[in-house]
Structures are given as structure tokens and as C-alpha cells.
């Protein structure tokens, strides 16, 4: 529709409708006045239109024709023609000098344009007051119309109006009501038809409930000015009130309410005096005109004339802020990426083996041989043999960390008197070199760890930026519908926002009473309206006492329940195993079993530290590679012999895709309905041994009611081999994850003669359809 009105035909249609509206107003203002005696509105309306640069010839012709149609006599024709002539002369005179007519001059021109009217009506002393009222009221109404047209043409009526603009619009409607009150069409009340149509239209294009009530009151007051009867004011006020009270997403509620109200007022309260079918038909005709407007047309009218929602700027600001935040996160991502490259470039690494040997040999010779009297013979005469012998001793020391007399060949021991000094010096140099390699390795590991974290932060920021740049669109119509549905369910909302990202996931944020947050009807009503099962994502206290702000989104297709069981190694008071079952963002679940090497408190501390690091990294939404690499480097820097086997499963509840990640962990299992699938690792060493690890990662799409089973090696070893454990799991006829975990651990304890030879932990999770 917007496109049509932008075309040439659309502009012609708009102009025709505009001039038709002007003619109707001229006619109504010509027949409507004060007590059917003073009619000051028509000429004032004409002058206001000319001042607002409407075509003087067209509006002048419409004014004259409407005046003649309202009262077919020579005086009416001459009065209107003289008014048009005077105003046209004044308008073109000012236009020639490119000057707008000042309002004070316009008032003078308006009085002069009514000279013919005054000539014919100032016939006696009794006519002075009515004529004076005619001029004064006309001047005031002219200024009122100018203000109305300025508001409509310059900035639109959908924006907030000032108090004087409100008054001008009300006076304009009152004058219109006076004209409608003078129309008598075979006993039909045209004012009812127009008033009902305008009241219904205002009810559904303006958010404020006061607008349709004010429209009804103003039209009723205009009718009272014309007829001296205030009953119509009360009738239209009651009709507008019923329309507002029963306003909903369906316009038929207000239509039905108005019919009932009109019939009750007419028959029971005798508001019309003599209530007949013609009055009812007048009301029904106004409703029929409103119902004939399609919803799309109604939305178009609301967009053009209706109140602009005060949250439009806020909603637009949301996307603008997201866009700015997205750009900043991309820039920060590049900064951290550059820091990653910079730190990696500072990693020196250890000296090559050949250079290390040469350095140690030169240091040895400078400390032992520099003042030896046999120096010349050893290094000049027997130089080749001496160098080969010393190289062999240093190589042996580098391999074993120290040298002894057994490493000194006869060639050197039979000729050199400083053999013991050589042994002591070499061992000192080897100890210093070992300390050097440890320091360099630690520094390089720290730099690599920091670089790894910078790279992880860079990737995380880029991921967040990708999510943030998605456009958020709001659905205000759906918000009104949802609010109404929840109100019917006795759930009161203070605010409701419905939005979606790139046409994908629908979400909503509601401000509602704390007591309503736990009502089952809340989720049921949301799911019914969204057409999919909804779930509460988060909630927080609002600044409104007793209210919470709750965020809802589409529930994942799958959900899961879990169970765990375990026992300590026989004779130990604590277990070296740890496990985690954690709900992550994005409808993901983390299952992890960590087996600290050995048993007892040291193993417990190691496994607890590992599982805590894993949980926090996953909660921060780092990727698998960064998490495992960073945790491994952190643990490898502890300089202890405690390591951890890690078994992880990350399950996406949206599509049942599971990532099985194993680092030195035994096989896991997926129990299907009729079979068991073994998930083995690729022989990776436990985490914390080497600085670089290559975890085994397998992806698997699960089905409803599949059961994931992760065990520590204490359980697997109790069954001697994984095939026996697989067969045992396959023969289980239970589906409760907790019962499965308990049964497996109890069987493992039984196989160890009730004295577990290692810590045992079993973690089970069953996936099921949630929607």
C-alpha cells in the first residue's frame, strides 16, 4: 500500500480523497453551528486552508458550492464568493512578494472578507451580538484550524501533541459534531455512524485509551452545541468507553460491545428518546465501515496516523548498540590475535644439541685446562683424540644427567692428572645446564600458555561478535496478543517484548509478578502462542517491587537426566576421581569424569583441580582445543608426578549431537535400545604429562532414550576387559541412569571381592525427547 501511494495514480487518489474530505467539512461547517443560529466555522476553515497553501481556486470553489448547497439563496452565494475573492487577492499579493501572511494581518483580512455577511445581517441592535460572536468565533476557529493543519502537514499527528494542539483538535471535532448533528437523513443518525466509525478507528490505531473517549465526547459536545441536547454526549461517551474496555487483538469484541451498549442505552435508559431501527442501523453502518477495513490497511493507517510507540527508539537502539558492540568485539579479537602472535614469536626454545655440547666443552676446557702444563700436548699433538673423548663424556652426561669414572675412557685417565676435577666440573656444568633447560622450558611454557589464552579469547570474542551482529526484530502485534492471552490466564504483565534473531529463534522477555513465575499456565500459554514448547532461560528481580524480569526461549528438542555412583579405593577415605554434570549455554550439557593418577588425597586434589578448570573454561564458552591445551599446559607446569585421565562428553540438546573427548581415559559406552556401542580413545596420554596433547575426539548423533556411560579405569579394570563390561551393560533391562550407575559400580565392587583395588566412578545420562 505504501508503494501504491508513492506512484502517480496513488498521488491522484490521495488528492481526490483530500478534496472530498474538504468538501464534506465545508458542508458540515455550513449547516452546523451554535443552536442553529450562528455558523462561523465554514469561512474560518476556508481561510485556514488557504493560509496552509492549499489550492485557493479548488478550495474556494468547494467552499462556495458547499455554502450554496447548505442554504440555497443569493446571500449565501454572494457571502461565500466575496470571502473567496478577498482572501485570494490577499494571498496572491503576499505570494508575489514571497511573504507569508502574518497571522495578525490574516485576522484583519478575515474580518474584511465577511463584509457582505455583516451588511446583510447587521440589520438591528439585536443582531449586533450574534454578528460579533460570528466574527470572534470564526477568528478563533480559523486559528484552531491553522494549528491543526500545521500539526498534520508539518510533523504528523502520531507524535506527542502539546496542550494547545490537543485543544485545537478537540475544537475541530466539536465543530464537526455540530455539523453532523444538523444532518437529518430520513431519520437516520449520521452522527452515530461517523462517531462509531471514528471511535473504533481510534481505539485500534492509538495506544492511549483516552483518544477514542475524547473523540466521542467532542462529537457529542458538538451535537449539543447544535441542538442544545446533552444526551448524545453521554451516549457517545458510553459507546467510546465500551469500545476501549473491550479492546483486544480481535476488533470484533469492541464492535459487539458497542452494539450491546447502544441497544441498552436506547431501550432501557431511553437515551435517544424514541429508539428505532433507524438509530440501530446508523450504529451498525459505522461498525460495518470499520469492519470492512482489512487488518493490513488498519496497520497502515496506524503507521501513518497512530501514536508512535515510545519504545521504537529503544528497540532501534538495541540493534544499534549491538552493532557497535559487535564492531568493538571484532577489534578486540584482532588485538588478542596479534598478542598471541607476538608472544609466540618470543618463545626461544632450547639450544640445539650440537650447540649445547660445544658450549659445555668450551666451558669445561676453560675451567680445567687453562693452566695445565700438558695443555699444549693434549690439544695440539693429540687434539683430535682429546676432542672426541671429551665429546663422548659430555654426550653421556647429557643422556644420563651426570658422569662417573666409568665414563672416563683409558685414553684420558692414563694421560690426564686432573680426571677428578674434570668429573666434578662436568657434573657442575650439567647441573647448571639442567637448571637452564628447566627455566627456559618453564618460561617458554608460560609464554605458550599466555599465547594460547590470547588465541582462545580472540576466538571467543569473534564468536560473540558473530552472535551479536545478528539483527534483532521485534513483533509488537504479537506482544499485544501475548499480553492479552496471559491476562486471560490470570498472569499479569507489566511489560512484554517478543523478538527474533535473523528470523530464526523466537524469544520473549516478560516483566511479571513473582507469584506468576511458577504458574504452569505461564509456560503452557507461551508454548501455545509461539507454536513450540518454550522454556524459562533466566530471571532476575525487577526494579518494580514484587516483579521479576523473565527471559523465555524455545525449549531444546531433547532433554536429559543423569545419575552417578562411585566408591573409594579400599582403605582410602577419599576418592581420586571427580566428575561433573553441567548445563552450558546454547542448550549444551557437559559430562566429565576425571581420574587422578594414583589414589588418596594427592589424586583427589589433582582431579578436583582438573575438573574445576574444565568446568570454568567450558562455562566461558571456549572451544575444546583451547580448553584441553590450556588445562594441559597449566597442569604440566606443576612439576609433580600426578596426572589425570579425562573423559568428556559435550551433548547438544538441540540436535542430540555428542562430542566424546578422551585424554588417557578408558572406553565409554552408548547403550541403545538393542545394542551397546563402545567409544574408544586413540591412546592419548593423560593430561599434564606432555606440554602438547592430541585428544581423541569422536562425534556421534544420538537417538531418543540412548544412554551415555562414562567410567573411570577402576570400573573398567574390575571387569578385566571392556567387552565384559559391554556385555554387562547390554544385559541391563533398566533405563534409569541412577540405577544403571549404581548397578555397574556394585558389580565392579563384587568383582574385586568387595575390596576395590582402585577408585571407581560411573556417570550415566539418558537423552529423551522434550518436545
Image (tube, rainbow, N blue to C red):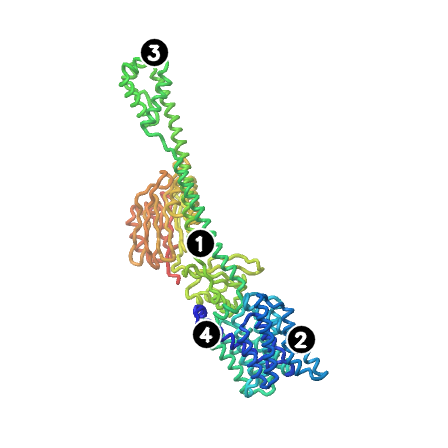
Q: Label 4, on which residue?
A: 294
| 51 lies left or right of 390 | right
Q: Earlier in the sequence, mark 1 or mark 3?
A: 3
Q: Label 2, on which residue?
A: 136
Q: Position of residue 594 (x, y in %)?
A: 39, 45
- Cα–Cα span, label 3 and label 4: 115 Å
Q: Mark 4, mark 1: which one is toward the viewer?
A: 4
Q: Label 3, on which residue?
A: 373
Circle 4 packing at 10 Å, graded few (<14), some (14-19), many (20+), is few
Q: Position of residue 524 (x, y in %)?
A: 45, 66
Where disc 4 sits, the SS reads loop
In the displayed structure, 602 sits above or below 653; it is above
Circle 3 packing at 10 Å, graded few (<14), some (14-19), many (20+), is few
Q: Label 1, on which residue?
A: 468
The N terminus appears in which quarter of the rendering? bottom left
Asked if residue 489 can be seen in this view, the reply is no
- Cα–Cα span, label 1 and label 2: 62 Å
- Which residue occupies the foreground of this view, 251 or 1? 1
Where disc 2 sits, the SS reads helix
Q: Position of residue 226 (x, y in %)?
A: 63, 81
Q: Earlier in the sequence, mark 3 or mark 2?
A: 2
Residue at 65%, 69% in the rendered image: 104
Q: Earlier in the sequence, mark 4 or mark 1?
A: 4
In which quarter of the view is residue 218 placed?
bottom right
Amino acid at each position: 500500500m505504501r508503494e501504491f501511494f508513492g506512484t502517480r495514480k496513488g498521488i491522484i487518489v490521495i488528492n481526490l480523497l483530500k478534496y472530498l474530505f474538504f468538501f464534506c467539512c465545508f458542508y458540515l461547517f455550513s449547516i452546523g453551528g451554535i443552536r442553529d443560529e450562528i455558523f462561523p466555522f465554514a469561512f474560518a476553515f476556508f481561510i485556514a486552508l488557504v493560509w496552509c497553501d492549499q489550492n485557493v481556486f479548488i478550495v474556494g470553489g468547494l467552499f462556495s458550492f458547499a455554502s450554496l448547497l447548505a442554504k440555497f439563496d443569493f446571500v449565501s452565494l454572494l457571502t461565500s464568493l466575496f470571502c473567496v475573492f478577498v482572501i485570494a487577492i490577499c494571498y496572491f499579493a503576499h505570494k508575489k512578494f514571497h511573504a507569508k501572511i502574518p497571522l495578525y494581518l490574516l485576522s484583519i483580512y478575515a474580518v474584511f472578507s465577511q463584509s457582505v455577511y455583516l451588511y446583510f445581517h447587521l440589520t438591528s441592535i439585536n443582531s449586533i451580538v450574534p454578528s460579533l460572536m460570528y466574527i470572534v468565533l470564526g477568528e478563533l476557529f480559523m486559528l484552531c484550524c491553522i494549528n491543526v493543519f500545521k500539526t498534520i502537514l508539518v510533523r504528523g499527528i502520531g507524535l506527542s501533541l502539546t496542550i494547545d494542539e490537543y485543544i485545537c483538535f478537540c475544537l475541530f471535532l466539536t465543530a464537526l459534531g455540530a455539523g453532523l448533528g444538523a444532518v437529518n437523513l430520513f431519520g437516520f443518525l449520521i452522527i452515530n455512524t461517523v462517531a462509531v466509525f471514528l471511535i473504533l478507528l481510534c481505539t485500534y490505531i492509538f495506544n492511549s485509551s483516552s483518544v477514542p473517549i475524547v473523540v466521542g465526547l467532542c462529537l457529542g459536545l458538538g451535537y449539543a452545541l447544535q441542538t442544545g441536547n446533552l444526551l448524545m454526549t453521554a451516549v457517545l461517551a458510553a459507546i467510546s468507553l465500551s469500545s476501549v474496555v473491550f479492546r483486544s487483538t480481535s476488533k470484533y469484541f469492541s464492535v459487539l460491545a458497542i452494539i450491546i451498549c447502544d441497544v441498552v442505552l436506547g431501550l432501557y435508559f431511553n437515551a435517544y428518546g424514541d429508539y428505532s431501527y433507524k438509530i440501530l442501523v446508523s450504529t451498525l453502518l459505522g461498525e460495518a465501515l470499520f469492519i470492512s477495513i482489512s487488518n493490513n490497511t488498519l496497520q497502515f493507517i496506524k503507521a501513518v496516523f497512530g501514536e508512535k510507540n515510545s519504545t521504537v527508539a529503544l528497540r532501534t537502539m538495541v540493534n544499534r548498540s549491538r552493532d557497535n558492540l559487535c564492531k568493538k568485539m571484532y577489534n578486540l579479537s584482532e588485538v588478542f590475535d596479534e598478542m598471541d602472535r607476538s608472544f609466540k614469536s618470543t618463545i626461544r626454545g632450547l639450544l640445539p644439541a650440537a650447540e649445547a655440547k660445544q658450549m659445555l666443552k668450551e666451558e669445561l676446557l676453560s675451567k680445567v685446562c687453562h693452566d695445565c702444563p700438558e695443555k699444549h700436548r693434549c690439544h695440539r699433538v693429540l687434539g683430535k683424540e682429546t676432542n672426541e673423548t671429551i665429546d663422548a663424556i659430555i654426550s653421556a652426561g647429557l643422556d644420563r644427567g651426570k658422569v662417573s669414572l666409568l665414563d672416563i675412557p683409558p685414553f684420558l685417565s692414563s694421560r690426564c692428572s686432573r680426571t677428578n676435577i674434570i668429573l666434578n666440573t662436568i657434573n657442575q656444568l650439567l647441573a647448571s645446564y639442567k637448571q637452564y633447560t628447566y627455566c627456559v622450558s618453564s618460561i617458554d611454557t608460560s609464554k605458550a600458555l599466555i599465547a594460547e589464552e590470547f588465541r582462545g579469547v580472540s576466538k571467543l570474542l569473534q564468536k560473540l561478535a558473530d552472535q551479536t551482529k545478528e539483527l534483532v526484530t521485534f513483533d509488537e502485534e504479537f506482544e499485544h496478543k501475548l499480553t492479552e492471552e496471559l491476562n486471560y490466564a490470570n498472569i499479569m504483565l507489566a511489560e512484554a517484548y517478543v523478538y527474533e534473531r535473523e528470523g530464526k529463534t523466537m524469544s520473549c522477555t516478560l516483566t511479571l509478578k513473582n507469584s506468576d513465575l511458577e504458574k504452569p499456565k505461564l509456560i503452557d500459554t507461551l508454548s501455545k502462542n509461539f507454536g513450540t514448547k518454550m522454556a524459562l532461560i533466566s530471571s532476575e528481580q525487577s526494579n518494580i517491587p514484587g516483579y521479576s524480569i523473565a527471559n523465555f526461549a524455545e525449549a531444546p528438542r531433547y532433554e536429559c537426566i543423569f545419575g552417578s555412583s562411585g566408591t573409594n579405593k579400599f582403605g582410602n577415605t577419599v576418592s581420586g576421581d571427580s566428575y561433573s554434570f553441567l548445563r552450558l549455554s546454547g542448550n549444551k550439557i557437559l559430562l566429565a569424569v576425571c581420574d587422578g593418577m594414583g589414589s588418596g588425597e594427592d589424586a583427589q586434589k589433582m582431579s578436583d583441580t582438573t575438573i574445576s578448570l574444565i568446568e570454568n573454561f567450558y562455562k566461558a564458552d571456549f572451544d575444546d582445543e583451547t580448553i584441553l591445551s590450556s588445562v594441559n599446559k597449566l597442569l604440566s607446569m606443576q612439576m609433580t608426578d600426578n596426572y589425570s585421565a579425562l573423559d568428556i562428553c559435550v551433548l547438544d540438546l538441540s540436535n542430540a549431537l555428542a562430542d566424546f573427548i578422551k585424554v588417557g581415559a578408558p572406553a565409554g559406552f552408548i547403550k541403545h535400545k538393542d545394542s551397546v556401542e563402545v567409544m574408544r580413545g586413540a591412546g592419548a596420554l593423560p593430561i599434564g604429562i606432555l606440554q602438547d596433547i592430541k585428544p581423541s575426539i569422536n562425534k556421534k548423533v544420538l537417538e531418543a532414550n540412548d544412554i551415555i556411560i562414562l567410567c573411570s579405569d577402576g570400573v573398567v579394570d574390575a571387569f578385566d576387559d571392556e567387552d565384559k563390561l559391554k556385555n554387562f551393560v547390554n544385559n541391563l533391562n533398566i533405563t534409569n541412569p541412577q540405577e544403571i550407575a549404581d548397578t555397574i559400580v556394585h558389580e565392579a565392587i563384587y568383582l574385586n571381592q568387595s575390596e576395590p583395588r582402585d577408585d571407581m566412578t560411573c556417570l550415566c545420562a539418558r537423552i529423551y525427547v522434550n518436545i
